[in-house]
Amino acid sequence: MTQHAPSKVTITLNGRDYVVTCDAGEERKLADLVKIVDSKLADIAGKSSNASETRLFMLACLMLADELQETRKSIQTACSADEAIMVAAVNHLKGRIEAIASMVG
């Protein structure tokens, strides 16, 4: 297996350039992530005109962590609901099979 050297990429967050390293081939994904973070920074900066850059980044991290937590909760709730539906379907099928078996036997 051939290993590719990591790529050094310049990203821009809140108007400031940063050089970061990512796995070769992951540049597009990194660019997409940068768009999400930079958008969040711009939203916060628009509401807090005098916040320091450190505070902007801290608030963006907290807001993104909150979104992540809410997404995880939603997924967990959806999985639980799906599981309940599957259990009900299996129980229904079990009842049908038992009814058919009683007619045959």
Image (cartoon, helix red, strand yellow):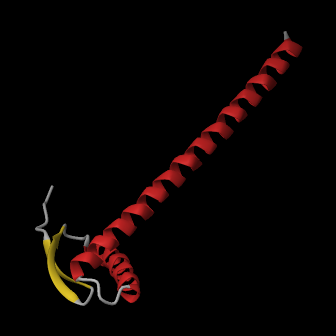
Image x and y of residue 75, in percent? 52, 52
Task: Give the residue furthest to the right.
Answer: 103
Question: Which quarter of the picture shows residue 53?
Answer: bottom left
Q: Is residue 70 found left or right of 100 in the rendered image?
A: left
* Residue 62, above or below 105: below
Q: Is residue 25 found left or right of 32 in the rendered image?
A: left
Total labels drawn: 0
Task: Give the residue furthest to the top.
Answer: 105
- Quadrant of the snapshot with the C terminus: top right
Q: Is residue 9 found left or right of 70 in the rendered image?
A: left
Seen at 35% across and 80% down, the residue is: 35
Q: Nearer the viewer, residue 60 or 17?
A: 60
Task: Give the residue furthest to the left.
Answer: 5
Seen at 22% across and 77% down, the residue is: 54
Can the viewer see residue 95 in this picture? yes
* Residue 58, above or below 9: above
Question: Which quarter of the picture shows residue 20?
Answer: bottom left
Image x and y of residue 10, in percent? 17, 83
Can the viewer see residue 29 in this picture? no
Seen at 89% across and 15% down, the residue is: 103
- Quadrant of the snapshot with the N terminus: bottom left
Seen at 24% across and 83% down, the residue is: 52
Q: Nearer the viewer, residue 41 or 47?
A: 47
* Residue 36, above or below 90: below
Q: Nearer the viewer, residue 91 or 11?
A: 11
Question: Which quarter of the picture shows residue 101?
Answer: top right
Image x and y of residue 59, in percent? 33, 72
Q: Is residue 41 found left or right of 85 in the rendered image?
A: left
* Residue 72, above or below 62: above
Image x and y of residue 82, in percent? 62, 44
